[in-house]
Amino acid sequence: MTRKRKKEERKKPGPKLSFSNQFLYQIKLLAMLGATNKQIALFFAKDPTTIENYIQKYPEFRDARKQGGMVADLKVVQSLFKRATGYDFVEQQLVMVLGQPVKVKVKKHIIPDVKAIMLWLTNRQRALWTNSSQVRVSGEVSHKHYNVEDIPVEKLSKKSQELLFEIGKEQLTNGVRDN
């Protein structure tokens, strides 16, 4: 009889999550602040896999998470754009005027950041700004490797002979390597 009860208990569904507007609003706010699923789970005292399950099982949960995440992403995009294009801001500073501290507003300019520019362009215009290129080669490539002693030195210019001498010295000290 005990086995039967255990099987019956296993078949019972777990507690259902009731989505109140307040709960979904909190999910959205946490996501807007850039919270990860793990951080959301910590906030609600749930296991991170539970949050993953909620995202899959409950469309309203998934939508609240997604909407908040999009707001966070837009904030980052805006900040990256400002870094890439440069921006002005006003800062208050204390200066001494006739021996007395006075607050003054100082306009400052942040110049564009090259790394932010490259990140922006390589992601938005990949074909034009990628750091690597793809080259397709077909056919056979033959390569001959010559040892220094096989090259007719007398036919080379003086500069080439000096360079050849340096290469030969390198090969003698490090051993000849076939490429």
Image: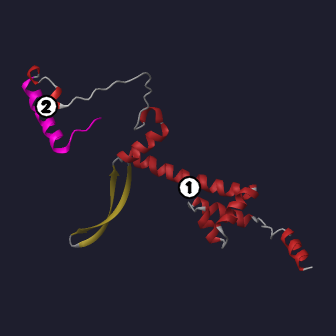
Amino acid tagged 2: Leu
Residue at disc 2, secondary structure: helix
Image: 57 above or below 95: above
Amino acid tagged 1: Ala
Residue at disc 1, secondary structure: helix
Q: Where is residue 22 in the image (x, y as percent from the top left)?
A: 72, 66
Tell me how the rendering is colored.
secondary structure
Residue sticking out furthest to the bottom: 2
Q: Where is residue 41 in the image (x, y as percent from the top left)?
A: 64, 68
- Residue position marked by numbered label 1 in the rendering: 72
Residue in view at x 44 percent, y 23 percent? 138
Q: What stretch of residues is rendered in magenta? A: 157-179
Residue sticking out furthest to the top: 155
Quadrant where the image shows the N terminus: bottom right
106 or 8, nearer to the observer:
8
74 or 131, nearer to the observer:
131
- Residue position marked by numbered label 2 in the rendering: 164
Q: Which dot marks residue 82?
A: none
Left or right of 177 in this view: 159: left
